[in-house]
Image (cartoon, rainbow, N blue to C red):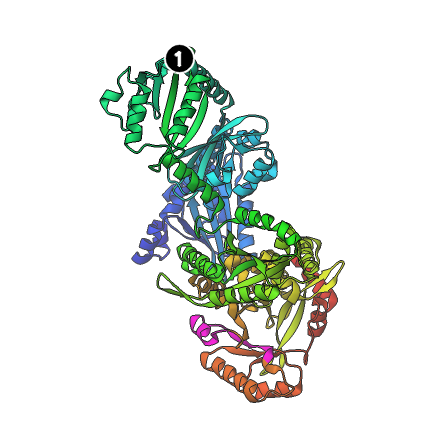
Amino acid sequence: MRNASKAGNDDPLLRAALGSMPYGFSIWGEDRQLLLFNRHYLDMYRFPAEQVRLGMSLLEICNLTVAIGNHPGVTAEELNKLYESRFFEARTSRKVVRSEKPIRDRVVKTSHIFTEGLGWVVMHEDISEDIARDQSLADQALRFKAAVDNMRQGLCMFDKDERLVTCNDAYAELYALPPNLVRPGTLHTDIVEYRTEHGMKPVHGAPSFLSQHWQLRHDEQSRVVVVELANGKHISIHHQPMADGGWVATHQDVTDEYHRVAALEARERDLNLQNVRFDAAINNMSQGLCMFDKDERLVVCNTPYAAIYNLPPDLVRPGTTLTQIMSHRFAHGMVPLAGRRSYIASRKRLVANRIAAKDLIEMEDGRTIAIQHHPMPDGGWVATHEDITEQKKIEARIQRLARHDALTDLPNRIVFREEMVKLESRIERQENVAVLCLDLDHFKAVNDTLGHAVGDQVLINVGQRLREAVRETDVVARLGGDEFSVLAHSLGGPADAAALADRIVKLMAEPMEVDGHHIAIGTSIGIAMAPADGRDTETLLKNADMALYRAKSEGRGNYHFFAKGMDEALHRRRALEQGMKVALMRGEFRLMYQPLMNLEENRICCFEALLRWDHPERGLISPAEFIPVAEETGNIVSIGEWVLKEACRTAVHWPEHIRVAVNLSPVQFKKPGLIDQVAGALAASGLAADRLELEITESLLLAETDQTLEILHKLRALGTRISMDDFGTGYSSLSYLRAFPFDKIKIDRSFMNERTPRGESLAIIKAVIGLGQNLGMSTTAEGIETEEQLQAVRDQGCNEVQGFLFSAPLPSSGVDALLGISAPLAKAARSKRA
């Protein structure tokens, strides 16, 4: 900095500031002369301090850097041209121009900033270590990939959302997985379904793989599962949970080992039969074992045998007769339920006929003893006795769990279908049977806001209420999630089914207290009557489900009988769902734009983007029909992203004072990535953020979740405007205005239901406009169709109006014409953006 001092820069604060900078710093005048630099600048380029002076030209600096060998093979003139291009780019673009260049054994990143009247400020940063670190990480990743790909075992890793993170070729080859199922992000269930459909199954009657997987996900320790493939291979899967909720699993072909073990087991069984005298003497067997000779005298028995029948030491000595042992057992209450004589006679028959047999003996004391009897060539026999009382209880419990819902203890779908099949013969005899399919209303909101523990208790309470509502002969089942069914037979007719459904609806509407929470849910019920609505299980269930759909679509909290024609409506809905999946790809969606007028300036201030669907077969489909379906199926997320991009792309060439308004669905707030979608649409189009208005409805804030408010604040931070649409029609409008400071509130068109608003409607309009003025929010009146309506809202101080009085929704070309934008200019603007 000595030269800088000579130029008058002796300010100690300036010297300290320049010296403390962690990077090189230089300033160049508009005549390309060096005006200022710091020590880091000299060190970075290895410039001798005595050879660098203020006022040096750019070419002189280039001569010096080439002379000291910073750029082998490059001349000073070539280097000077390169620097000149950077200076020129920074000056003409008025942006920061960054570049990287090698300087002998290092890489330097420079940032050029041009300021009128000063010149160029250039920052010089040594990024050699960053590049080396990035290369090291890349090398580590390659080594990791090589190690994984060369493993003999198949390896896969899934995240906490059960989506594939990575897998190796061995994993894909083991199950012959197609490429689309080994891409990162693939759902675990999709992969398992493919493997199951191609023959994968559990071994030895084990539960389904997904059932075992569910247990593994909830177990913090590593576990091993063995499955069998269609080609006969046995695969051992070692599941290792990770701290973040995901897991790593290795898949190994253990077919040979599995067959070796099976062969060994078979050989061991043969040896047990051939060498029964030796094996019978082992006292650590889980079963009791006894051996008697042809004279019915004890040869040997083990400790478990004595324990089962509480035999004293003198009765377990060799030579003890069977009669003595049986007398002790009978005297101490160990009597078979079939009776003493029957039991003794069956034992003698087995011995006399040398019959091998297995028996389960139920005892009067409540125990169950499993006995295996094996005759021997010398006329004696060997038998094993095992107390399986607890095992039978466990098996009974497992069987019950397989047929009953573990949470509510209600019968499950299997039992429900079995009971329906039993009734088919009675239906053929014209007996009235009702199938009720139930869905809980607002249950998902309970789970999302209060947690699954509360949701589980709600389901338990629902099961109890359903038991209370039905007769003892009726069957109540939980089919899964919040779906329940009731099977009622021997009914007088539909009136009895309606009475039952009404009783259930009223019971479910009663609030319940769970962990201090006051919870109000309801239920919707679909009813199918046999034999009128079907005579077989599948038909009745399908028709009851269609009736349930109708009940939910009519407002929930009610019941609906199946009626002819519902299946056609369901087919139309399914066709709508299928068509929606490809509508975006085929370009069937388009946007219309309806203008909003600023009453103070008497000019257009905004256009609201309105979605339309031109179906190739059905023609124009009403948004009221397809948008609810899009929200239920989740397709609204991809459609909404397209609407954002298209609206911004169209609006960017409008006059700068005109905004575009886009409606956001509550479903878009529940899916990740909304912030990025909005930011991406703005960036791709070049539209200023303050020209984009995002409209939400009050239903979004019904739950008042912290997540929703956080997203709204982040959208506001981008610079966008936030409007509340259809204000005044929700549940608690004023509380929403306290929760979030909206830029605008739009008065719902329902308050403009008269040619001239009056009475209650006018009072509400006046109150909303006054509220907006007090809170600093602008107000827009929707549905303005008459001059009287316009004058009424203008008199109350409304800021903006929208409606057919001014214009119907227009295509983008119509907007251009309305704004006086020439077609060639609009086309050129769109082409430039594209």
Front residue of 495 and 435: 495
Instruction: Quadrant for the C terminus, please.
Output: bottom right
* Residue furthest front as drawn: 341
Q: Is residue 399 magenta?
A: no
Q: Is residue 744 magenta?
A: yes
Left or right: where 334 falls relative to 526: left
Q: Is residue 787 above or below residue 713?
A: below
Q: Amino acid at mark 1?
A: Asn
Picture quarter containing residue 629?
bottom right
Q: Give the magenta part as a residue range.
A: 731-750
Left or right: where 445 falls relative to 539: left
Which percent across, then down, holds residue 156?
Answer: 49, 35
* Residue furthest right as drawn: 617
Q: Is residue 511 above or below residue 65?
A: below
Q: How many marks?
A: 1
Q: Is residue 823 visible?
A: yes
* Residue furthest top as drawn: 378
Q: Residue at x 38, y 18 (%)?
A: 382
**Residue bearing the label numbered 1:** 275
Q: Residue at x 72, y 67 (%)?
A: 813
Picture quarter containing residue 169?
top right
Q: Is residue 785 above or below residue 440?
A: below
Q: Secondary structure at mark 1?
A: loop
Which percent across, then down, holds residue 528?
Answer: 62, 59
Left or right: where 216 falls relative to 297: right
Q: How crowded is the residue under tag 1: few (<14 C-alpha within 10 Å), some, or many (20+)?
A: few
Front residue of 567 and 277: 277
Which percent across, then down, holds residue 790?
Answer: 62, 85
Q: Is residue 104 visible?
A: no
Front residue of 313 and 58: 313
Which percent across, then down, holds residue 208?
Answer: 51, 38
